[in-house]
Image: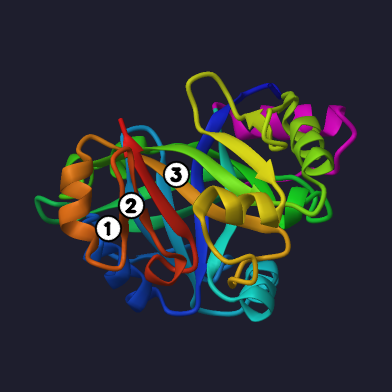
Amino acid sequence: MLATLEGLDHVVIATDDLDTAAQQWRDLGFVVSPRGVHSAHLGSGNHTIMLDDDYIELLGILTPTEHNAPTREFIESRGEGLERFAFRTSNAALGADALKQRGFASRGPIDFSRPVDLPGGGQGEAAFSVFHWPVSETPAGMRIFACQHRTPDTVWIPELLEHPNTACGINYVEIIAQDPQDAAHHMAHLIDSTAQPLEDGSYRVDSGPGRAYFMYMTKSLFSSRHNIDDNAALPTEGAAALVLRARSLDAVARHVGPQALVQANHVTVPAQRATGVMLVFEQA
């Protein structure tokens, strides 16, 4: 792995309506953090769904800025959905230097913060340092960056970790690509990992030891895996499904409602109920 990278830290789901997105995830049995507002140069706000050692970020644009132009373009061209992957870095400055040494024009480190309402009352601050791969380096249309948590205790707040649906972590992400082999090798090259071909024609890229991994596949293979119409509203390229771990699939089934597909070993929630991302729950 690239120096200082530890694996997938969180995924970023872009939305044009933060309030509606947050309510969608609450309706699925998740605890959603209060809205956070990022530093002014970012121009964005968020809600987080915290899991044991990773998380999901719902991101919306509050004020157009140069920094958030790619997110605005994503929403305008594709609509809501999973827009970016964030890797955890132990040191953003050293990570940015390591990326430059591999020949990539990294951006950062960039420092920012957001206020946090604390469960016992009062307010804290969540502070981060990030660096970005070049915007041109987007395997299967997905941007990537790395995040150093300077104040993890104000992000992984215990009260935010106890989800009624028992979700506890990200297993992997399924990504549609016109050329899965090329996309997988591209991602592997960017993070200094490897691309592993699988028997069904998909490719797996590990993000780090014990962390979530990426699965690259064609649209037709994705449709076959999930028994959906090839002409469904799927991206030509991009992340299409987020596969989560849950401690109790029975608890998931009780919370996700009748539109979900409940089977013996997993529960699937359609993308229109989760801000443009299909959710699949598997037993932890």
Q: How many marks?
A: 3
- Region of the chain picked out in magenta, as a range: 90-110
For the residues bearing labels 2 and 1, Cβ distance under 8 angstroms:
yes
187 and 267: which is toward the camera: 267
> What percent of the width, then of the height, locates residue 46?
41, 64
Q: Kindly report which numbered mark, 2 or 1, lies closer to the viewer in this rendering.
A: 2
Residue where numbered disc 2 is placed? 49
Circles 1 and 3 in contact, beta carbons < 8 Å: no
Separation of marks 2 and 3 at Cα, in angstroms: 14 Å
Instruction: Residue at 46% x, 66% y: name it.
Output: 271
Is 262 left or right of 128, judged from the image as shown? left
Indicate the amino acid at tag 1. Ser
Q: Secondary structure at mark 3?
A: strand
Please say which color scheme the image uses.
rainbow
Rendering coords of residue 242 (x, y %): 48, 49
Q: Quadrant of the N terminus?
A: top right
Q: Is residue 206 above or below residue 66?
A: above
Q: Which of the two labelled residues, at mark 2 and mark 3, occupies the earlier sequence position?
A: 2
Q: Residue at x 57, y 65 (%)?
A: 42
Q: Residue 243, labelled with which disc?
A: 3
Could you classify mark 1 by the number of other residues whose Cα lies within 10 Å: few (under 14), some (14-19), or many (20 or more)? Answer: many
The answer to whether residue 251 is above or below residue 199 is below
Using the rendered image of the protein, determine whether residue 128 is visible from the camera's viewpoint: yes
Question: Would you name the residue on which mark 1 appears?
Answer: 33
Q: Position of residue 78 (x, y in %)?
A: 65, 74
Q: Which amino acid lies under the numbered mark 2 shown in the image of this protein? A: Ile
Q: Is residue 150 magenta?
A: no
Badge 1 element: loop
Residue type highlighted by circle 3? Val
Q: Is residue 178 left or right of residue 215?
A: right
